[in-house]
Image (tube, helix red, strand yellow):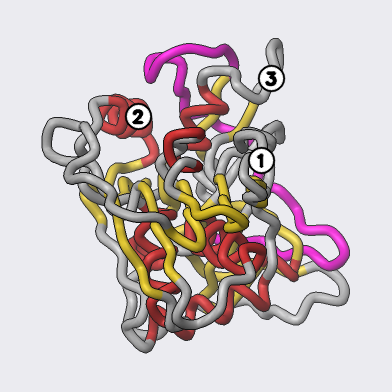
Amino acid sequence: MRAVVVRGFGGPEVVEVVETEVPEPGAREVRIRVTAAALNPVDVAVRTGAFGGAGKQVGLGWDAAGVVDAAGVASVWAPGDRVVALDHGISGALGAQAEYVVVPVDAVAVAPVGVDDVHASTLPLNGLTALQALDAMELSAGQSLLVTGAGGGVGGFAAQLAAHRGLAVTGLARGADGEFAGSVEGEFDGVLDAAVLGETALGWVRDGGVYAGVMPQGEPASVRGVRTFAVQVTADGAQLAELVKLMEEGVLTTRVAGTYGLEEAGAAHTRFAGGGVGGRLVLVP
């Protein structure tokens, strides 16, 4: 099968498509024939060496939509099931940007009905990050939340989820020039900092409020009694199923800016690096 990998760190030019053996699922694992795999900032971080792995092959891709192809012992999934999944990992030899991916059974959910695979593939990583960050913030209906990077994948889902929960949501997004448009007035019970503004965003939290970051261990230090943390996303099929239901109901929406074949993965990275994409880029094996 074909798979997108890096074997050295750098710009889009280090992205390769290699031929490799189709992986076999073990006990409580499932193999998915991938029909769409979203490109995310974490793939750029892996490509540039932010997570290490020098001297070995590292697969790219965390998000997958597709069809179950084979299942190991004790799997609740069967061949032919249409699914979405989070392939959680930053140092494995293969990722979700491949013709096939093997993931644990509890990282999978039935794909959303009425949503094509390209759009469905943008849900797992960004949706779970937003959901798990909001859960950990423990805000109640009626409280105020500022979401930075509200035009992006995580920020967009976070704003939609928070509004659905009854929070008073303010979104802050980049303008056409790449800078954050508008000004922030007042203070908020919480800030979900999907744009990674750090201490700037922390300054918009009221005394005793809560700040949630999306870069693991990258949150600013607590000040003024503000609780600060950064979410470290985990694969959770039950939570992913909740997100699927909300996507089916139209609560969660997503934008796709373009699709690329696996062999065009480097071109997708180049376009992503240029900024101002205005939606997700998705690889289609």
Q: Which label sits in the foreground, 2 or 3?
A: 3
Residue 107 appears anywhere in the view: yes
Distance (Cα) linking label 1 and label 2: 35 Å
Q: What residue sits right under mark 1 in the picture? A: 222
Marks 1, 2: nearer the viewer: 1
Residue drawn at (48%, 78%), measured in percent from left and top?
Answer: 244
Above or below for 221 versus 278: above
Residue annotated with mark 3 = 52
Relative to the observer, which residue lies in front, 74 or 234?
234
Q: Quarter-wise, where is residue 271 in the image?
A: top left
Give the image location of residue 158, x and y in percent. 44, 63
- Mark closest to the chain's N terminus, 3 or 1: 3
The numbered mark, 1 or 2, whose residue comes first in the sequence reads 1
* Whole-percent x, y for residue 176 in the image: 12, 38
Say which element carries label 1. loop
Residue 156 at x, y percent in the picture: 35, 60
Q: Amino acid at mark 2?
A: His
- The boundaries of the magenta stretch are 7-33
Residue wearing tag 2? 269
Say what secondary structure mark 3 lies in. loop
Q: Distance of mark 2 from mark 3, alpha carbons? A: 19 Å
Query: Residue 90's x, y, as percent?
Result: 66, 35
Image side of residue 256 versus residue 83, left or right: left
Q: CA distance from mark 3 to mark 1?
A: 28 Å
